[in-house]
Amino acid sequence: MTKEEKEELIRQKENLKLLFELSKFLPTADMQADFELFKNMTPKERAMFQEKRAQKIEAMPGDEKMIFTEATEKGLKAIKSELQDVKLALELGDVANALSLSYIAKEYFGKSKTWLYQRLNGNKVNGKPARFTEDERKRFAAALLDLSKRINETALKFV
């Protein structure tokens, strides 16, 4: 197999992986197909596509429109959840290297460091990406604030 063939195989594999991952954001085959068309369109073609799509949705019978709406809401919720996880990872940045995440997991959650790392990194657990619940996200923020306060108080002792 040539280098080019290997690279093409890798690209195809990544595209399949991306398509599989997109299924949580675009829950129906119709939505996925439309997305594949949409992403290669010019801005003018996209505007026309959106108009036609809106007309198509408007013309849907009640049941079909309800199913479409539910699928859209499901996709939007998945996007929101994914964005919250990405935002958390970006905001945490290299601070994670300076903190004992093991300590945070044990003291603030009563869990193992593996549990915390799974949520911070979105690792798959039982086939699904591990995520913080809203309560856990707030608890993690409170833990960081508490540690920040304690570090600040300790630093002031050295001034």
Image (tube, grey):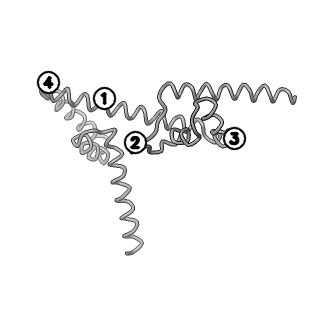
Label 4, label 1: how far apart the Cα atoms are = 16 Å
Task: Categorize mark 3 by other alpha carbons within 10 Å: few (<14), some (14-19), many (20+).
Answer: few
- What residue is rendered at 44% in x and 43% in y? 125
Task: Give the mark nearer the N terminus: 3 vs 1.
Answer: 1
Q: Earlier in the sequence, mark 4 or mark 1?
A: 4
Tell me the element at label 4. Answer: helix
Indicate the amino acid at tag 1: Glu
Residue named by callout 2: 128
Q: Disc 3 and disc 1: Cα gap in Å?
A: 38 Å
Mark sitting on residue 62: 4
- The answer to which of 110 and 144 lies nearer the viewer is 110
Label 3 vs label 2: CA separation? 28 Å
Counting residues from the start of the chain, the first of labels 3 and 4 encountered is 4
Q: Which residue is mark 3?
A: 98
User: Is 84 located above or below residue 113 in the figure?
Assistant: above
Q: Position of residue 13 (x, y in %)?
A: 36, 58
**In the rendering, which numbered label is found on residue 73?**
1
